Amino acid sequence: MKKDFNILLISIMTFGLSISCNKDDDNKEECITNNTEYITSVDSPETGTVHQVINIEVKFRVSNGCGGLGKFIETNNGNTRTIEVEAKYEGCICTQDAPLRMVNYEFIRTNTGNYELKFKSSPSEFITANLSIN
């Protein structure tokens, strides 16, 4: 009798766990947010060539381990470009460190000239990179 009771108890527990582990996709929590973050450093060459990609190393800090690059937000004004980072945070459970992320910003021009790239490093400050495109 005790053996039958143990089998019944194990069966009920297994069934209960299988139900609790099945999640309905319609109720799935997404845990995705976006936030503008400030750029901490920029490593850029001073010259480039028309129609050639110039890779500029950009570093920014995110507020937790789920953060990474979402996209660059760019504003153009003549030969001046203002660049901000929008970080994308994916995940419901994140480490609570504030890691530094490094990404490449790709700059390409079809015209020669001098260009000023202003990377937003605080609400009112920028890290500036000046490029001469030949």
Image (tube, helix red, strand yellow):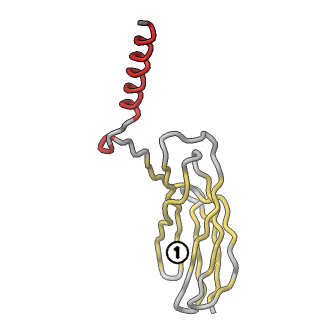
- Nearest the viewer among 7 and 127 is 7
Q: Position of residue 39 (x, y in %)?
A: 61, 59
Left or right of 127, for residue 11:
left
Task: Locate the N terminus and report the quarter of the image it occupies.
Answer: top left
Q: Work out which residue is located at the far left of the displayed protein and give it.
A: 26
- Nearest the viewer among 116 and 30 is 30
**Residue at 47% from the left image edge and 66% from the top image edge:** 73
- Nearest the viewer among 27 and 81 is 27
Q: Position of residue 105 (x, y in %)?
A: 58, 71
**Residue at 41% from the left image edge and 34% from the top image edge:** 21
The quadrant holding residue 11 is top left
**Residue at 48% from the left image edge and 41% from the top image edge:** 92
Pointer 1: residues within 10 angstroms few (<14), some, or many (20+)?
A: some
Task: Locate the C terminus and report the quarter of the image it occupies.
Answer: bottom right
Left or right of 71, for residue 95:
right
Q: Amino acid at mark 1?
A: Arg
Left or right of 81, for residue 60:
right
Q: Position of residue 99 (x, y in %)?
A: 64, 49
SS at badge 1: strand
Residue 58 versus residue 14 in the image, above or below = below
- Nearest the viewer among 68 and 127 is 68
Residue 63 versus residue 116 in the image, above or below = above
Q: Mark 1 sits on what residue?
A: 81
Q: Position of residue 71 (x, y in %)?
A: 49, 64
**Residue at 57% from the left image edge and 62% from the top image edge:** 120
